[in-house]
Image (spheres, rainbow, N blue to C red):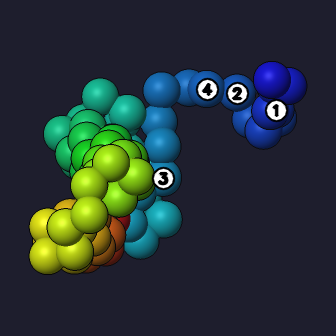
């Protein structure tokens, strides 16, 4: 995998909602990361479930939960 350079370096800050710079160690930045990881994990669950089970109702529920992760992310970010 090739490296990506931003030419700004990493000074321990990130941009959050409203283009505000915030410490990466802040609770808000940690929460955004957790929700992002949850969204990815839910997506993987949907894929694995659909490949191994033939139960539409549960799959639709998993998809709905995955979409809720995006809703939560839009609120906090």
Q: Can residue 71 be seen in this view?
A: yes
Q: Nearer the viewer, residue 63 or 21?
A: 63
**Tag nearer the camera, 1 or 4:** 1
Residue at mark 3: 15
Which mark is on residue 10? 4
- Count neighbours of disc 2 (C-alpha within 10 A) and say few if under 14, some if 14 to 19, many if 20 or more: few
Q: Nearer the viewer, residue 13 or 43?
A: 43
Which mark is on residue 39? none
- Count neighbours of disc 3 (C-alpha within 10 A) and say few if under 14, some if 14 to 19, many if 20 or more: few
Quarter of the image holding residue 64?
Answer: bottom left
**Tag nearer the camera, 2 or 1:** 1
Mark 3 / mark 2, whichever is N-terminal: 2
Residue at mark 2: 9
Residue at mark 1: 5
Which residue is found at the position 14% from the left and 76% from the top? Answer: 57
Q: Distance between the residues labelled 2 and 4?
A: 4 Å
- Marks 2 & 1, CB-CB < 8 Å contact: no
Which residue is found at the position 78% from the left and 38% from the top? Answer: 6
Dot 1: element:
loop
């Amino acid at each position: 995998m090739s490296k990506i350079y931003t030419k700004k370096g990493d000074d321990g800050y990130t941009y959050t909602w409203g283009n505000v710079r915030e410490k990466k160690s802040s609770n808000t930045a940690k929460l955004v990361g957790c929700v992002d990881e949850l969204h990815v994990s839910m997506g993987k669950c949907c894929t694995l479930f659909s490949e191994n089970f033939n139960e539409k109702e549960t799959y639709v529920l998993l998809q709905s939960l995955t979409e809720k992760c995006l809703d939560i992310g839009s609120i906090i970010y």
